Each structure stands twice: as structure tokens, then as C-alpha cells.
Amino acid sequence: MTSRFDTFPPRRGLSVKWDAYDADVLPLWVADMDFPAPEPVTEAMKARAASGQFGYEMDAPALREVIAARMASRYALPTQPDDVLLQPGLVFSLNVVTRTYGAPGSPVLIPTPVYQHFIYAAANFQRPAIEVELPSTLRDGWLYYELDFDALEAAVTPETSVFLLCNPHNPVGRTFTRAELERIAEFCLRHNLLLCSDEIHADLLHPEGAHISIASLGPEIAARTITLVAPSKAFNVPGLQVAAALISNRELREQFIQSSHHLGVHASSVGFPGALAAYTQCEGWLAEVLAYLTGNRNALLAFVRANWPGVQITKPEATYLAYLDFRGVDLPASPYDFFLKQARVALSDGPSYGKGGEGRVRLNYGTSRAVLMEALERMDVALKRAGAAG
Ligand SMILES: Cc1ncc(COP(=O)(O)O)c(C=O)c1O
């Protein structure tokens, strides 16, 4: 069966993913998809461009209302439009969090491996990052990562003030269960930690995934949680620079506003109509792209299982990102360097995600099936040539 996602227009000159490496490299790294944005987004952006209005806008009440209603109906997170602070992106918001909350220099607890900007956000404000490695086991033969609560208890100090959670998780692809999230909430309450929950991948679920927004567990945890969301991943529009920090606690919200307002960085008003269209007119597109991504994921897993017995891989419950462990095969270099040089495939280097990254890479399967399979074939040839398929 053919799909509209089987092909995509050239992206060179328009995307860092395709521009950062030489022309012969297949890029399966930075987390965007190769598909064009949904049609309603493009139409909304055309209308915005035609208006000729590019002045300061700063706020978009209709968009805040849509985000609040969507969080309530889709994720059972009671959200008022006033709780929604429009943001230029989640990386900015993560930095506002580490800039704003907790005593200066107080540690930030970060389960790793994780999206690297969590670690940078702590470092940017001279906050020690306490990295607590997520242990993995094999479930049905697939790598499965869980939080290590004993290690978290051992690592937290009385000075620790912030917990950075990634759910759904980049790069290990988990959607944390209610039981896991209840333990995180209990942990944060007991240790008096502010919780920042990055939920940018929430809408990108495979059939096995279920997203629970941690602040929906109850008013106590909601009162100390900052939830970060955006249309960027699910609808493939990170360039619009529109995201949101959801903060129901008035005091925390005021602190966030005070801390970020004078930086002069704001959500892109030009992107507002695109974000609104994504959230209101693109559910059909989302269902289609998710089905395609699940097909890609399954093709990737089948390929790894059939050809690389020494390699472990996650079975992502969400995201279009798989995490592969090459420590069981004898490579002459790190897997990132090896595949870039020997296969001309660009992956994301495991150690960039903090503790738990050595010998591992992240692979972005948000592309056409043909590009994915060509990359895997190239990697396979390189492994066999090195006598290292495992
Ligand atoms: C977990 C996570 N948070 C944040 C971001 C980036 O967010 P933004 O582009 O809104 O700054 C990414 C992008 O890959 C991500 O995976």
C-alpha cells in the first residue's frame, strides 16, 4: 500500500538535518520528520503571510484556549487559558526553569540518558546536574528502560530543588505508566522538588503507548509541576517556534513570567496561526502519520532482529526515535563515528545524552520507509565489512 509519506520534497537548504552533513550522508539524527507539515498548517501560514502583519503580537488568547481545552479533554489535565504561557520553544522553557526555581547553585535531578538540553539547562545556570542512570532490561527481547527509584533516593540531597522529567521519553521511547508517575510524584513531594515535565512527544504514540500527563495525577503534584508542550513534534512544525509552559500554581507562574519577561524572547507570533491549525484541524493527518511511523518502527525492529543478533534496540512506545546499544558487537570506533564514516549514515551520538550513552546511538525513523531501509542496508554492509554484525 502506498502512502503520502513514501516520498518527500528535497529538504536540503531548508533543514539542519539535511544540511549539517555532506550530500552523500543519510541523516537520521535531529528530531524532526522529513514530511511536509499538514496542509491546514501551510494554508494558515500562507494566510498569515498574505496579511502583511508582522508586528508585535505577543499573545494569542485563542491559541491559549485551544491548548487549555486540549490538555483537559485529551490528557485530563485541568488547565485554564491563564495557566498557559506561550513560549518560543521547550529548550527556552527548560532554561527558564533552571534559571528560576530553587536556590542558586542547588542541584537538578536528571534521569539519563535524556535529551541533552536538560543537562545543558542545568549547566547554563551553574546548577550541578545529578544524573541518575535509567537501568534497562530486555522485554520480549527489546531494550526496556525504567526509572531506578533506589538510585534516585540515594542521589537526591537536601539541597536538590528541581526534577526534570521527560515523558514520553527521548531517547528511550517510554511512556511512563501511572504507577511509575505516581512514584515520581510521591518522590517529588517528599523531597520538596519542583517538577518540570517535558511532554513535547505526548501526541506521538505508537499503539503500545499511553500518555499520562503527570500533573493530572492530583492537585498536590499539579501545584509543583510545570508542564511543557508544543505542536512541534507531532505536527512537525518546530520551526514555527510556538510552545507552551502550563503552570496552574499562580506563584510559580508569576516567578516564571518575572524571570523570562525581560529576556525579550517570546513565542513567534507569525507561528501562532500554524500552531492553532495544527491543534484544531490536523487530527486526521496525525493518525495517518502515526500509522506510518509505527510501520517504520516495526520494519526497523524486524531488520535489527533478523540481521544484528548482537545489537539491542528499544521498541519505542512513543516518539519516532529508537535507541540502539552496540556494546555487544566489536566496533572499531563509537557507533556514531563508525556509521558516519563507514555507512554514511548520521545518527545521534549516545554520550550526548549523559550517563548511559556509551556505545549507543539514537536513530530517527521519522522519514520515508525507503530512506530508512537504505540507511539500514548501508549500516548492515558496514557492519558485515567490519566483521561486526554480532
Ligand atoms: C524532549 C525534547 N524536549 C525539547 C525538544 C526541543 O524543543 P524546542 O524545539 O521546542 O526547543 C526536543 C527536540 O528534540 C525534545 O526531544
Image (cartoon, rainbow, N blue to C red):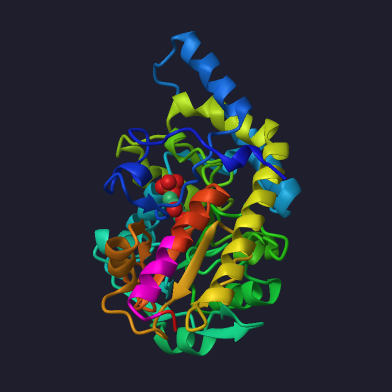
Residue at image point 64% right, 45% down: 289
Residue at image point 66% right, 56% down: 295
Q: Main secondary structure of the magenta part?
A: helix
Residue 208 colored magenta? no
Q: Examine the rendered structure and indicate whether residue 79 appears above or below residue 58.
A: below
Residue 135: tell me if it is visible.
yes
Looking at the image, how many numbered discs can be counted on the residues? Answer: 0
- Residue 22 point in image, percent of width and height: 26, 47
Residue toward you, 108 or 171: 171
- Residue 345 point in image, percent of width and height: 36, 58
- In the picture, which quadrant includes the N terminus? top right
Residue toward you, 188 or 169: 169
Q: Examine the rendered structure and indicate whether residue 103 appears above or below residue 73.
A: below
Task: Write down the region rendered in magenta.
Answer: 378-388
- Residue 28 point in image, percent of width and height: 42, 55
Residue 58: tell me if it is visible.
no
- In the picture, which quadrant includes the C terminus? bottom left
Residue 281 shown left or right of residue 117 in the figure: right
Residue 231 shown left or right of residue 179 in the figure: left
Residue 336 shown left or right of residue 65 in the figure: left
Residue at image point 58% right, 44% down: 83
Residue 381 colored magenta? yes
Task: Say which quarter of the image contains residue 100.
Answer: bottom left
Residue at image point 39% right, 16% down: 55
- Residue 131 point in image, percent of width and height: 37, 77
